[in-house]
Amino acid sequence: MKTDAQLGADVATELRWTFGERAPQIGVKVHDGIVALTGTVDDPTQKRAAGGAVERVCGVRAIKNVIGVQSRRQSEWRK
């Protein structure tokens, strides 16, 4: 059984593989095998892709995907 630290490292690796160099800023926390994803992405497909990446990591017991989706118009408005 993997430790939370090992799971966190594996999830981070899988997210980098999924998104490549243009990876959004996604926070990863692991407690008792439950992975929580936080942060903000530009569209819902990125949020789903992040959840899918975590599903591919062996040893994850559950996923709490609380990533927010911010439209590009909102991000431009805040500048």
Image: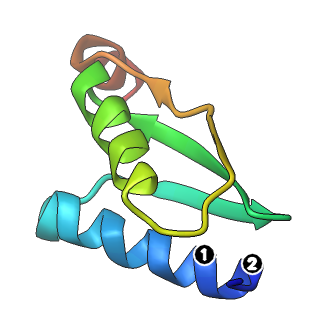
Q: Secondary structure at mark 1?
A: helix
Q: Is residue 45 above or below residue 53?
A: above
Q: In front: 25, or 15?
A: 15
Residue marked by disc 2: 4
Which residue occupies 71% across, 62% down? 29
Mark 2: which amino acid? Asp
Label 2 crowd bin: few (<14), some (14–19), many (20+), radius 10 Å = some
With 53 as the anchor, is 58 left or right in this view? right
Q: Could you tell whether 76 is left or right of 47 in the image? A: left
Q: How is the image coloured?
A: rainbow
Residue 25 appears in the figure = no
How far apart marks 2 and 1 lie (CA) works out to: 6 Å
Q: Position of residue 18 (x, y in %)?
A: 20, 60
Q: Residue at x 27, y 35 (%)?
A: 46
**Dot 2 lies on which element?**
helix
Q: Residue at 34% across / 16% down in the picture?
A: 77
Q: Tell me if 40 is positioned left or right of 8 in this view.
A: left
At label 1, counting other C-alpha atoms closer than 10 Å, the crowd grade (few under 14, some 14-19, many 20 or more) is many
Q: Name the residue nearer the viewer: 59 or 4.
A: 59
In the drawing, does residue 57 fall left or right of residue 18?
right
Asked whether the residues under the numbered discs 2 and 1 touch, taking CB atoms below 8 Å apart as contact, a structural biologist would say: yes
The answer to whether one can see residue 76 in this image is yes
- In the rendered image, which quarter is residue 50 located in? top left
Q: Residue furthest front?
A: 1
Q: Position of residue 44 (x, y in %)?
A: 30, 20
Residue 61: percent from the left, percent from the top?
68, 53
- Residue type, mark 1 in image: Gly
Label 1 sits on residue = 8
